Structure formats: C-alpha cells, structure tokens
Amino acid sequence: MIAIAKPYLTADEAQNAYDTILSGWVTQGPKVQEFEEKFAAYVGSKYAVALSNCTTALHLAMIVAGIKEGDEVICPSMSYVATANCIKYVNATPVFAEVNEFYNLDVKDVEKKITPKTKAILLVHQIGMPADIDVFKALCAKHNLQLIEDAACAVGSSFKGKKIGSHGNLTCFSFHPRKVITTGDGGMITTDNEEHYKRLKLLRQHAMSVNDRERHTSTKLIFEDHLEVGYNYRMTDIQAAVGIKQLEKLDFIIAERRKIAEHYNKAFKNISGVRIPEERENYFTNYQSYALYLIPEGKLTRNQFMERMLEKGISTRRGIMTSHRESAYKNELKNVSLPESEKYADNSVILPLYYPMSTSDIETVIKEVQLLLSGA
C-alpha cells in the first residue's frame, strides 16, 4: 500500500530526543525555549510560543484576542473541524463563509457576513497554500476586526516573499505527523505583540506566575501564584528536541515535496475533467497536501476514483471536510448554504505526497491516475 503521508524522521531526531531524556529536563525546559527562538527566527516573527498542538494554539489565540461569548468569528467551513471548534471553546459563534478555487476564504463573501457582533476573521492557509493575507488585513482594518491565522498546514509557505507567521497578529501552526514537519504532536503560535506573547506563556501553564525554569534554577525560595484560570497546554522538551532537528530540515523537505508535486502537475495538467493545484505569483506553497479536483460529470465520481485507487494499493483521502455538514454543527446550522465549499469538498481528492517517496511509488500513482481518469 502506498501511504498518503509519512513523517520524515531520522537518527538526528532520535539522538536529540535521547540526549534530552538523559538530561533530566523533559518538559517546558531549555529545549522548548530553543525551539521557540529558532522557529521565530525562521518565520520572521518577534515571538513564538510552543504548545501541545495546533488546536490548543487556536484556543489560546481566541482568548488573547479577546473573543468571548456573544461574539462572532468568520471562518471557512471547508477546514478541519478544529478551526470552528476553537471559536466554540470561548462560547463565541463561528460564522461560515465561502471559499474560492484555491480552497481559501473568499473575501467578498466574508465581507457580506460581517455584522456588529463580528470581532475577528480566522483565516486558514489551506493544505499549505497561502491565503491573500493583505486583502484580509485591509478588511480587518476597515471594520476594526482581529485577524487570526490558522496555519496548521502552512509551515514554510510564503506570501509575497515573507514566511507565513510573519504577517499577522496571531498565527497558529501544527506539528502533527501529517504535516510537513512533526514533533509527534505539537503546535506553535507566532506573534509580534509582546502583550499577547506574555499572556500566551502564562495561559499554557495554568497561568503560573513563575515558570518551571525560574523555579528550578533559583537560588532563593520562590512560591508561584496562579494569576487567572489557565490550561495545561505545554510542549515537552522531548517533542521540542525533535522539532529543532525537523526545523533544520524544513527547507530541504519542502524542496523535495515540491519536486513531487511538479511531477504530478506535469502528468495531470492535460487530463480532461481534472484541475491541478495552481500556485499564483507571490504565493509559495509547501505542498502539505496535493489536492486534485475532479470536475463533476467527469469519467468517475470522486468516491469511485478513491475506491479504484484503493484497489490498486494507493491510499487517498477525501478533499477538505466542511464543518457545517458534520454532526457537531449541522443540526444548529440547517439553513447554512455554502455551495462552493460543498462542491470543492465533494469533488477533490488528496493524493500521496511525502518525502522520501520513492520514484517507483510516484510513477505508480501517476500511471493509475492517468489510466483511471483519461483512459490512457
């Protein structure tokens, strides 16, 4: 079976994790701080805060942005359900807007859905393809809204020559094994706002007034206070040790993923009824996923195509889900109409793409896609 994705982990990560374990400091210690500093430097932000995963990062982003009960946050439905869930965690209301052909928010539809209750826009850089950050920054400035970025899939991607994580107020990343780099699980928030940075560090560790490093290295007796209701959203030093080594390889991994995507693009661009991903000028994607869009009324439906690929020993995944049709949301959102999101979700399929993917596996995927969709 050709897998849909595999993390690229080597002896470097294992050795760094091993050394960290033997150091005796395995959580919220010097390796976490090192990973944060190196990640901030990589993306070009002032600050980075490591967390247990991207969902907890999104939750804390909502809190420090001041989103609360009664507020509305506009976001895509066409995204993993965590995007909408983080809004519900603070008792606010997710307002779903349409996406464009690049699977990112449609700014015109977003503006139509702004109300006096709207407090923020949660912009998703879907499957690693950057959204147009500038138009959303302008829209937020016009309506006095916060812009928060869900960059779960977009580590290493760029918009107008700047890394995702350097443009906005609060940007959240994932290090899940399906992502381009991994810490097993884990997340990060980048920000240039010092007040946000300080509060994020508090909230991730039960809002403890004195962090573990300060307590354990102090030559004087220190008692901590808990300044507000916080959370246990910490990253371990073992995870951070893996992340440090993964970050060193990130540009190389992205370059290799882009080579595979280019092979796919070249092979599929002339198949009738298929649309390949488009990378526009000033947009640089890490190809976290390769989504092929099957135009309806084509040779095969998306699900038929996936079944045939599975029969050939090739894993695929459905296109990005739509949260408004999941059981957690559909009963309370019966009147939501998002035909574009549903069209793209129901007719797109994600193909295997990872490093190191063998030339033989790449060629097998290409051959089977061509046979199934073009009859070649």
Image (spheres, rainbow, N blue to C red):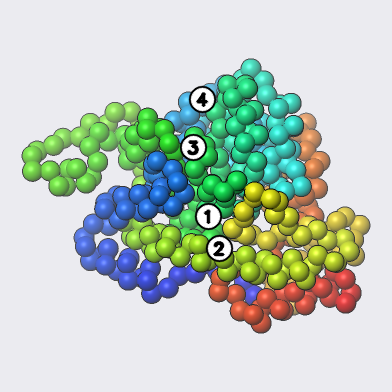
Q: Tell me, for residue 156, which label it has, or none.
A: 1
Q: Is residue 113 above or below residue 217?
A: above
* Disc 3 to disc 4, C-alpha distance: 17 Å
Instruction: Give the secondary structure at mark 3.
Output: strand
* Marks 2 and 1, how far apart at CA: 7 Å
Work out whether mark 2 precedes mark 4 in sequence or the reverse, and give the earlier one: 4
Q: Secondary structure at mark 2?
A: helix
As helix, strand or loop, the secondary structure at mark 1 comes to: loop
Front: mark 2 or 4: 2
Label 2 vs label 3, nearer the camera: 2
Residue located farthest toward the left when viewing the structure as drawn:
220
Callout 3: few (<14), some (14-19), or many (20+) C-alpha neighbours within 10 Å? many
Q: Is residue 24 or residue 168 the one in the foreground?
A: 168
Q: Which residue is mark 3?
A: 170
For the point 54% across and 47% down, the residue is 162
Name the residue tied to disc 2: 254
Q: Nearer the viewer, mark 4 or mark 1?
A: 1
Quadrant housing residue 194: top left
Q: How many marks?
A: 4
| Residue farthest to the top, as pictured | 116
Q: Residue at x 57, y 48 (%)?
A: 161
Work out whether 165 lies above or below 266: above
Sooner in the amino-acid sequence: mark 2 or mark 1: 1
Q: In the picture, which quadrant includes the N terminus?
A: bottom right
Q: Which numbered mark, 3 or 4, is in the foreground of this view?
A: 3
Q: x, y percentage for residue 176?
A: 50, 57
User: What residue is shown with label 4?
Assistant: 68
